[in-house]
Image (tube, grey):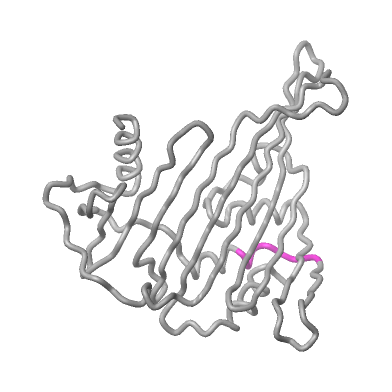
Amino acid sequence: MTLGALYRCLLDRLDAPLGLRVGIHFEERTSIVVEDAASGNEPTRIEQRTFDADLTVRDGQVVGATLTAGAVGAETLVVRIAEFDGASRYSIAGEGFGVLGVRPDLFDLDAFGVRLDGVPVIDAVIDQETPDGSGRIVVDAEIESKSFARLLRAFGGGDSENPELPLLSHSAVLSASSDVTLDYWWSLLGLDEVDGRPARHNVVVCHVHASFAPPTDADARVAPIAANPELPMLDDLDAVWERARQRRAGA
């Protein structure tokens, strides 16, 4: 049994002939705990960041996306990507659409399933919210740490055998009703030392929520997207993010 097999069993329940609406939410919170702090003191949070992707997928290809990146102390960045008439377009903060030179590799639904196939599940607890079968199915999957580290690379594509910091805890839950969701949480611990003695713990807590649902009527309609000739043509998605950061800095 793999996480991929559980994911496909739930995904097969969806009636989505026109494609899928895929939502991905990532959140990371970093805090520190000083080793000699008084008992009961709250840790000092030093960083919080989020990333959201709202994707429309047809025939296995992303045809539209809204990408949002946020962090404590910084203005949120929002960019849009769209496909029309065989060409890619980008938009930043409502300035219209410019030409994107390379179609961005945002999310591959089949490759995502293959990644999940590489995550064995030791055990799974399946629950249903109502006994008549009309409620949401919830699957709590038990995954050993090495396999869970492979799950962390399902969105990132890294090849390292272990995360940068050791895993403290982790969990993975799938559920299905009118949509299918995959939620997984993990925490990491880094230890700073001074003169060989523990000085503080750096605790990183992360959460990914991925949802899959049939597209709305608005998603199913393809509206013409004209490129604004006053906007520069950008090579790739990295260039779009850089332009968004520059616009934020100049605001």
The residue at 12%/47% (across/down) is 230
Q: Using the image as rendered, state which of residue 117 and residue 211 is in the foreground.
A: 211
Q: Position of residue 229 (x, y in %)?
A: 11, 51
Residue 85 sits inside the magenta stretch: no
Image side of residue 242 versus residue 126, left or right:
left
Image side of residue 52 versus residue 151, left or right:
left
The residue at 22%/63% (across/down) is 87
Reply above or below: 74 against 167. Answer: above
Image side of residue 90 versus residue 3, left or right:
left
Q: Residue furthest bottom?
A: 132
The residue at 58%/82% (across/down) is 12
- Magenta stretch bounds: 116-122
Image-quadrant location for residue 46: top right
Q: Using the image as rendered, state which of residue 120 and residue 225 is in the foreground.
A: 225
Residue 119 sits inside the magenta stretch: yes
Q: Position of residue 15 (x, y in %)?
A: 52, 85
Dominant SS of magenta comes to loop
Q: Position of residue 138 (x, y in %)?
A: 73, 72
Q: Position of residue 162 (x, y in %)?
A: 67, 44
Tell me the quarter of the image containing the C terminus: top left
The residue at 35%/50% (across/down) is 79
Reply above or below: 42 against 148. Answer: above
Reply above or below: 154 against 117. Answer: above
Tell me the quarter of the image containing the N terminus: bottom right
